[in-house]
Structure formats: structure tokens, C-alpha cells
Amino acid sequence: MKHTSRWQWGLFLLLQLLNLYQIVTHAMWRDELQTWSMVLESNNLTELFHNMRYDGFPPLWHLSLWVLSFISLSPLTMQLFHFACSLMSQSLVMIRAPFSANMRLIIVSGYYISFEYCIISRAYVLGVLLLFLYCAFKDWLMEHPFFKGCIFGLLANTSVYGAIISLALVVDGLWSAFNRRNEIAHTKHSLSVEVWRFMASYSSFFIVAVVFMIPPDDVRFAQGWNLFPSFSELFFLLIRNLLFITPIPIQKIDFWNSLAVIDAGIWLSVPVSLGILFAIWYALKTTPRYLGLFFIGFTGIWAFTAMRYLGYLRHVGSAMILFIVCIWLSAVSNEKKQVAVKWSTQIAIWSILIPNFIACWMASFYILKYDFSGSREMAQIIQDSGKNSYPIVADIDYAASSVAGYLGKPLYYVSNHKKETFIRWNSDRDDSGNPLEALRFAGDLAVTNNGQALLLLNYPIESIYARLIAKTREAIVANEVFYLYEYIQIKPDKQMR
């Protein structure tokens, strides 16, 4: 690894201070608070596992937060833990990655590492940390196959995308072991023991991940498999997933999950995606092993998006992390073999890293200027209104659940007429917003609460039964701009007039 100067370490420190500021001022959206609310409502692990059954996630993130919930009930605890994981990941890059100091700085300043998997508190940060731990200590892990299997198994327990990448790494590891069979100093038995230890530890964790990712029969989210996608679907998703590797967003408030290249049309999307594909091939062509590793993992993610769940930047972005892993391992391999890396290979890598750097700072501009979600502001409005004790009817439920997370109290969801905080994605609920049903539900609750009830909506309504109290500011997540109404109980004589 090349020398890192004091000013480069200074820039890294400034980046972390900025990341910390952004994460503590970040208004979390529903997916972040979904897990935290779930953890707080789980008195033991049995309840936690029961509550998370509809989310389709392995348990590692939930277990981590469950332990943290014994320290503090504030959602800031989750955010600080997430920042700590991100900081460790980025520090591993700065300390251990075999790149120039400038390249290491650009990597840690990229969109996924310093925004998507840093500011937004989700399980994916654990996958980044485990992948970079593997890269940083690969030589030691090669000599300790049991622990290597544990790392890959834990990776599978971060998300379905972590599981896909872990399978790609297992294929790579088994192929490498097969090719090294003549290098092992002892007997053929020692190779089988090495492989057995590795697979035993990995399989134990992987089975747990699979069990938790299998949803119940009554799940109503990402249902079914499309086992035979059409050619046009596969082609579109291939282009889209490649473009996610260099995620330049559209310049607008709700920039999140947008891609400027796709918005420009197919005439630009196709050549740019082909350029990304060429850059990846050129960056890794000196090490066919890691070129193969990338394409195995990328193909797995591509197949999953085509057959099961389309996904967004935060999902498919795991392919960008896999690319960083592959160039890291490739660089180490080239150093060991004393292979000179051409300047053109460096250009290919930079052509992937620079758009990520630009995208990160575009995202930071918007998140510093606007709230990510109106959830925190609305929770504060409700608390300051003096009406926090009123029953609150919420619609649409998945958007309003973020407010429930900040309030730390359940809401009455129109979707299933139940009092809940986090969302259970089952057949009991209905996604669609229903203002008439929201008013009827509020009226029913007002009858038993001295005529008092609030309506929390993510859409405006006009009704003699509802008086607008407040509306949150514009937000990056457009459907988490909230309206708070007080229910007006009309007396019979007033209705006659």
C-alpha cells in the first residue's frame, strides 16, 4: 500500500465528520424505522423472529439492533451504530486497501459507501463491513477456513444480496482450493479437511439466512417468482443494473433512486451501460479469477431482480461493492505475482469511481438542504400540538409508520383497522389510500374519545369533517410529506343546516 500523507488523512477525517453530521441530522424514512420499531416491540428473541417474518431479511441486523435496544430506546442509537459500522468499513479501505491514497479517498467518498450505506441506516452496511474485513484479512482467513466460512455465512445473513455475493465467494473459494490441491504440503486429506471446515461453518449460517428469508404464505410483498422473464425484461434490467454501478441522479428534490442516464432515454442508456461493462472487464482482465467472481455475483443479482424483486439503488448497489472487492483482491494478486498494472487499467477503475464520487456529493447537497422524510418533523408537530394523547388514524400505513417510529407509539392504520407501529406485510392490509375510510375510522374512534381524533395522511383532503393543523416541508422521499388534520365531529342539528 502506498503512503498516505497527513493532508489525505485530514480529508478522510473531514469526510467522517461530515458523514456523522449528516447521519445525526438525517430524518429517517419508513424502512429504517420499521426495523427499530419492530425491535422495540419485541420483548424476547422469539417475538423478534415472529415480528420480522414478513420482511424477508436474515436476522443479523435485527439481532444487532435488539442488543442495542437494551442500551437506549432512542432511534439515534441505531444511527450511531450504523455510522460506527460505516467508519470501520471505510477505515479498512484507508488502512489496508492496496491502492494509491487518492484512489482510497475516492472509494470511501463514493455514493454507496458514504451515502447509501452510511447515512441511511439499513442492514446493508454490515455486508460492506464483512466484505472489506474479508479483503483486509484474506491471507489469514485462507489459513483459517472455519473463520472464513463464518465471515461468508454472516454476509449471507445481512440481506438477500449479501447471500448472493456470499455464494459467489464460496464458488470462488472452492475453485481456488481445487486449483491449490497440489500446493498443499501434506496429504490429499488435508484439502478435504480444509474444505469441510469451511463449508460446515458457512452452511450453518447460510441455512439460517434461507430459513428467515422464506416468507409466510400470506405475505403481500414481492409475491411470487417470474421464472421465465422475457428477453426484453432481461435486457432492460441488465442495462439498468449496470447503470446502477455509476448512479448519477437527476437533479431534483426527490433525486433518490433516480438515474439521469435512464431519464435521458435508451439512446444514451445502452452505450453508457456498455461502456461500464467494458470498464469493468478492462479493470479486471489481468486476473480472470476475480473477473469471474464479479460476473458470478452480478449475474446472481441480475437474475434475482428479473425473477423476484426489481430492487432499487440500495439493493443493486451491492454490485458496486462487489466491484470494489474484486479490484482490491485483483490488486493484491497482481502485487504478489509482480504484475505491472498499466495506466489504462487505472483509467478503467477511475471511470467507475468518479461518477460514484460525483453522485455522493450531489446526494449530500440535497440531504443537507432538505429533509429526507417528513417523519421527524411531523412527530415533533404532534408532540408540540398538545394532542399527542388523541387517537391518530394514519393512511397510507407504510408511509405513516415512519412517524410512528419517531413518536414511539402505535397508530390506527386504515389499511387493516389495527393499532400498530411497524408494518406487517400480510393479507390483512390494503395498500391503497382511502380518505373516506380514514374519515369513517376517525369518526368511530372519536365517538369513544370525547369527539377527539387526528388524521395523519400523506395526501391532502377537503372535508367538513377535517381541519388542517399542519403540513410538513418538502422532502426527498416524496410520499413522506405529511398532512395532520383534526377530526371535526359534526352535531346532527349542524348537519341538517
Image: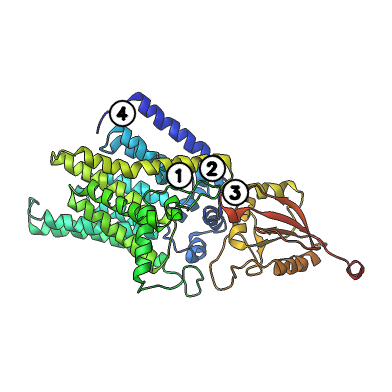
Instruction: Pinpoint residue 412: horizontal percent, then vertical percent.
Output: 67, 63
Q: Label 1, label 3: how many angstroms apart (C-alpha)? A: 17 Å
The answer to whether one can see residue 210 in this image is no
Instruction: Pinpoint residue 234: horizontal percent, then vertical percent.
Output: 35, 66
Determine the residue located farthest toward the front in the rendered image: 267
- In primary-sequence order, the first of circles 3 and 4 is 4
The crowding category of the residue bearing disc 4, from other C-alpha atoms within 10 Å (few below 14, some 14 to 19, many at least 20), is some
Q: Please tell me which residue is depicted at 64% across the width and 51% down the height of the picture.
A: 407
Q: Disc 3 designates what residue?
A: 475
Label 2: which secondary element:
helix
Q: Are marks 1 and 3 in contact (CB under 8 Å)?
A: no
- In primary-sequence order, the first of circles 1 and 3 is 1
Q: Disc 2 designates what residue?
A: 367
Q: Are marks 2 and 1 in contact (CB under 8 Å)?
A: yes
| Residue 217 higher or lower than 32, as above or below | below
The answer to whether one can see residue 348 in this image is yes
- In primary-sequence order, the first of circles 2 and 1 is 1
